[in-house]
Image: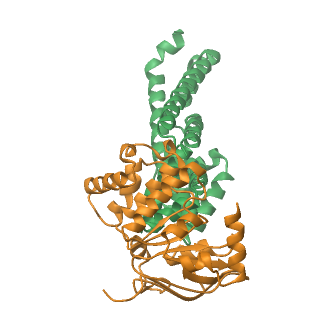
């Protein structure tokens, strides 16, 4: 291992850990947000449907960096609360990925055959029970590949948090480089680490959706 | 028990926009009766039976199931549907659940049976339709005929007062039609009230108490099975019969 990496290993590992931490929280909370927003759109819940639509379209039309600036600078100023770069980063990622995941969930929900909904209703299940036991389980299984695609993108997006001062993997690497100046070694190392993370997540996803595939 | 019919439809009208689908249909089905609904495609047969359990709405007229008005505002549709089973043309088994769970789902969530009791009942019903060894299979692993028998078991699991069949054999290969009709014949013999939309005239002749012939949204004939096949009263029914029995 190159000296510059060895010498700064604890610091870089700390950055790596922060990248994983940011990704995990963003994935878990973003998935919940996406599931709720996608379902609200699918069911056409009055009022909430419009709120979800505006949210999704706004996020999809806004650069990630701007979203982070909003959660770091604009929201605290607007609503008068204090935040940290770490929390603002997670909020931004959750909002960002949630909008894309909502669209994935919605398309999965819409892909469930209407005949199955009728069959569920015909057995006396309520609309909510049909959604919960028949539509959602199939939709989630069907969209697993798209979800993992978004998760893999998110891991790389977390590098943007370095701009608001979170020393995750990229931020840590840039700081080390600023002091020791070995751009090729440092950036190549970082790139390989991201690659390994993404491949690992992709493989986990593949195993998961092979296991849960819905055969029709 | 009163003499009220299990299903009573009076002067039912339904249209999609400006297109009328049902134009004043009246039909009454007594407890234990087997009624076959036939007629050319687009005549409103499927729509009519989907109105009975409220899967389709209607603009005017009345449908009473065991005395309860289906279209009334206060009607608890889920509760009513649990008492009227339905079997669909394309089976509509839940693809993400095993056969036994397909049959247990509504028992657990509608009848509030325990999971173990529901699975046990599912296995009993699978034995009844000849599929006891398929309890843990997934729907995709079954043939069409087997899937439809599971769908019948799923409808029976709620101990319904009547079962509606919407072209239950139309999506099946010829060699599988027989096994499904066999189960339906046994069901009829057990006294189940059945309304069956089908083109299987052999089944109709053997099993039905009455035949209802529909054309262009109207019930054109409502006759005993014998009378319908030997002496159809209307020109339209005679033409339909000659076409469908010719092949």
Q: Residue furthest front?
A: B230
Quadrant where the C terminus of chain B is found in the figure: bottom right
Front-most of residues B114 and B125: B125
Front-most of residues A148 and A173: A148
Q: Colour of chain B?
A: orange
Quadrant where the N terminus of chain B is found in the figure: bottom left
Residue B126 located left or right of residue A112: left
Q: Residue at x 57, y 83 (%)?
A: B222
In the image, residue B70 sits, relative to residue A44, either above or below, namely: below
In the image, residue A187 sits, relative to residue B184, either above or below, namely: above
Q: Residue at x 51, y 27 (%)?
A: A200
Q: Colour of chain A?
A: green
Residue B137 located left or right of residue A62: left
Q: Residue at x 63, y 80 (%)?
A: B231
Residue A33, visible in the rendered structure: no
Residue B93 located left or right of residue B14: left
């Amino acid at each position: 291992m190159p000296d510059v990496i060895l010498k700064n290993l604890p610091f870089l590992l700390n950055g790596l850990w922060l990248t994983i931490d940011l990704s995990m929280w963003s994935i878990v909370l973003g998935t919940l947000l996406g599931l709720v927003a996608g379902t609200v759109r699918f069911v056409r819940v009055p009022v909430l449907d419009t709120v979800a639509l505006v949210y999704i379209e706004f996020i999809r039309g806004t650069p990630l960096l701007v979203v982070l600036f909003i959660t770091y600078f604009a929201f605290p100023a607007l609503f008068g609360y204090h935040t940290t770069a770490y929390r603002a980063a997670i909020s931004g990622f959750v909002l960002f990925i949630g909008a894309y995941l909502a669209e994935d969930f919605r398309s999965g929900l819409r892909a469930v055959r209407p005949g199955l909904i009728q069959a569920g209703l015909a057995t006396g299940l309520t609309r909510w029970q049909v959604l919960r036991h028949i539509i959602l389980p199939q939709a989630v299984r069907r969209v697993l590949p798209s979800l993992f695609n978004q998760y893999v993108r998110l891991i790389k997006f977390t590098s943007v948090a370095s701009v608001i001062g979170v020393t995750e993997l990229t931020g840590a690497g840039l700081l080390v480089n600023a002091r020791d100046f070995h751009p090729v070694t440092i950036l190549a190392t970082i790139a390989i680490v991201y690659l390994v993370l993404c491949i690992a997540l992709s493989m986990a996803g593949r195993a998961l959706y092979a296991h849960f595939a819905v055969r029709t | 028990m009163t003499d009220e019919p299990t299903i009573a439809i009076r002067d039912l009208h339904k249209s999609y926009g400006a297109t009328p689908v049902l134009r004043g249909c009246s039909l009454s089905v007594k407890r234990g009766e087997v009624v076959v609904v036939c007629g050319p495609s687009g005549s409103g047969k499927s729509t009519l039976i989907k109105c009975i359990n409220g899967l389709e709405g209607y603009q005017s007229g009345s449908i009473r199931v065991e005395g309860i008005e289906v279209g009334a505002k206060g009607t608890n549709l889920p509760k009513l549907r649990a008492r009227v089973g339905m079997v669909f043309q394309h089976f509509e088994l839940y693809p993400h659940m095993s056969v036994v769970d397909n049959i247990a789902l509504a028992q657990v969530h509608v009848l509030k049976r325990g999971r173990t009791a529901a699975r046990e009942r599912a296995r009993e019903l699978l034995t009844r339709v000849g599929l006891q060894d398929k309890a843990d299979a997934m729907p995709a692993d079954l043939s069409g005929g087997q899937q439809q028998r599971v769908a019948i078991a799923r409808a029976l699991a709620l101990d319904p007062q009547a079962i509606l069949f919407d072209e239950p054999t139309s999506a099946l290969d010829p060699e599988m039609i027989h096994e499904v009709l066999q189960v339906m014949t046994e069901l009829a013999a057990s006294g189940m009230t059945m309304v069956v939309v089908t083109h299987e005239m052999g089944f109709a002749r053997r099993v039905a108490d009455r035949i209802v012939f529909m054309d262009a949204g109207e019930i054109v004939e409502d006759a005993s099975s014998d009378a319908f096949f030997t002496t159809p009263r209307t020109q339209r029914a005679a033409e339909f019969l000659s076409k469908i029995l010719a092949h």
